[in-house]
Each structure stands twice: as C-alpha cells, then as structure tokens.
Image (spheres, rainbow, N blue to C red):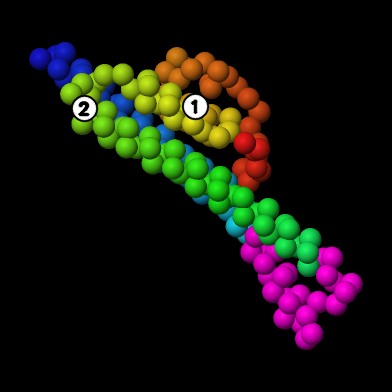
Amino acid sequence: MKQGSSAAETMRQEAASALNAAGEQISLALRESQPEVEALGEALQQLANAVSRRGGPGPEELATVQATMAQAITRLQFYDRMTQHLSHVQDYLARSAEQIGGSDPAGSWTGVHQQLSEQLLSETQRSHLGKNFSAGRLAPAHLDPVPLSPDGDIELF
C-alpha cells in the first residue's frame, strides 16, 4: 500500500511541476511580447500621424515614413515568435495530459520535459523551464547557467 501512495505522490508532484512549467512559459511569452506590442503601437501611431496630415507626408518626410513602416514590420516578428513558443507549450500540456492519463502515469516524465526543452527558442525559455525541475531531469546543457537577457530583450532564434 505504501508503494501505491508513493507512486501517487510522485505522480502528483510531476503533474504539478509540469503545470507550473507550462504556466511559467506562458507568462514568459506574454512578458516578452509586451515591449514589442508597445513599440509596434508607437510606430503605427507615427505612421497614422504622418498619413493624416493634410496632403499626406511631404517628400522630406517620406524617408521617415518608410523607416517607420520598416520598423513596424520588424516589430511584428514578435508575433511569430510568441505563436511558436505558445504552440510548444500547448504540445507540452497535451503530452502531460497523455502522461497523466496513460497506463503508467508515474512513468518517465523526462521525455515529456526534454521534448519541450529541445523545442524552446532561447536559453531564457529553457532556463525558466529548468527552474521547475531538479538537476538531471533535463539535459545538463539546458541547465548550465547562461547569461539571460533582461525582460523585454529579444534573443535571436
């Protein structure tokens, strides 16, 4: 009986860690996108102001309008990054649910966690995932201390 309750406790802890890790990844995705959304809004406001002037932008303003448009388009890249990140978290939650509902729910969660770690786009994302698990539960390369970008910075992927 004690072994059954130990397996149930392990399962509960694994499920809690998986849900915490997924929640943290969602929070990170939203936090990383916020500065980009704000910058995009500012660029679009500048474009709207330039276009709404009587007669539109003059020849001297055209280069500025073009540069602002290019900046706005670049800022939209956050959406692709965020969508990829959240898709990986969605897959992780689905795999976690399968693990919980499987025939051996106390079985290996390592593969579930490792797959997400390999799909994540940046060391900051992997670091946030690693905070939810003890050393050795994810590949050591993903738990090595790395300098993290400040919140709001974009890591190239």
Q: Which residues are magenta?
A: 39-64
Location of residue 112 by image quarter: top left
**Other-residue count near label 1 (Cα within 10 Å), few / some / many at <14 / 14–19 / ≥20:** some
Residue behind mark 1: 118
72 vs 106: above or below: below
Between 149 and 107, which is closer to the camera in this rendering? 107
The structure residue drawn at horizontal position 32% and vertical position 37%, both measured from the top left corner, is 94
Between 61 and 16, which is closer to the camera in this rendering? 61
Residue 73 drawn at (x, y percent): 67, 57
- Per the model, the C-alpha gap separating discs 1 and 2 is 23 Å
**Type of secondary structure dominating the magenta stretch:** helix
User: Of callouts 1 and 2, which one flags the residue occurring earlier in the amino acid sequence?
Assistant: 2
Q: Are marks 1 and 2 in contact (CB under 8 Å)?
A: no
Residue 132 drawn at (x, y percent): 43, 28
Residue behind mark 2: 102
Is residue 26 rendered to the left or right of residue 145? left
Q: Residue furthest bottom?
A: 54
Is there any visible trace of residue 87 in the rendered image? yes
Q: Residue furthest right?
A: 60
Q: Amino acid at mark 1?
A: Glu
Is there any visible trace of residue 31 in the rendered image? no
Is residue 141 rendered to the left or right of residue 19? right
Q: Amino acid at mark 2?
A: Gly
> Which image quarter is the C terminus in?
top right
Residue 110 drawn at (x, y percent): 37, 20
Between 4 and 102, which is closer to the camera in this rendering? 102
